[in-house]
Amino acid sequence: MITDEKTLSEILEYLDKSIDNLAKDSFENLEVAGGFEGVENFLQNQFDIRLENLLVAKNSSIHHLESGMKNKIIQRKQKVFENIAKKYKN
């Protein structure tokens, strides 16, 4: 189970890069219906799915994390999507 901040930080770093790469590919191809909002919704779903998969790989789940760790994830997700909006929303 995830019990320390270091492991969570490593997961979030990996997830940041993964979503950033996916965003680049998605916005270059724009094959998702709904324009920017459609792509953003797709990316947010992917963030949640990939996060849960990474946690499961560590024998954990979002439901097992302490509230402080959940807050860190929420803040990180907001930051990731603010950066995506700055890069790709025109």
Image (tube, rainbow, N blue to C red):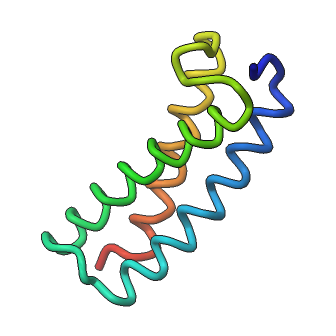
Q: Where residue 4 sits: x, y (%)? A: 83, 21
Name the residue: 62% across, 28% down. Answer: 72
Q: Where residue 69 sits: x, y (%)? A: 65, 21
Residue lying furthest left? 34
Q: Going by the image, does 79 lie left or right of 60?
A: left
Vertical relation: 22 (above or below) 51:
below
Vertical relation: 48 (above or below) 60:
below
Q: Going by the image, does 44 lie left or right of 52?
A: left
Q: Nearer the viewer, residue 9 or 82?
A: 9
Callout count: 0
Q: Nearer the viewer, residue 81 or 41?
A: 41
**Hey, which quadrant is residue 6 in on the image?**
top right
Vertical relation: 26 (above or below) 66:
below
Q: Where residue 74 sits: x, y (%)? A: 51, 32
**Hey, which quadrant is residue 8 in on the image?**
top right
Q: Going by the image, does 47 lie left or right of 54?
A: left
**Hey, which quadrant is residue 88 in on the image?**
bottom left
Q: Nearer the viewer, residue 89 or 27?
A: 27
Name the residue: 60% across, 13% down. Answer: 64
Q: Which quadrant of the figure contains the C terminus?
A: bottom left
Name the residue: 32% across, 73% down. Answer: 89
Q: Where residue 67 sits: x, y (%)? A: 58, 11
Vertical relation: 1 (above or below) 40:
above
Q: Going by the image, does 28 lie left or right of 67?
A: left
Q: Which quadrant of the figure contains the N terminus?
A: top right
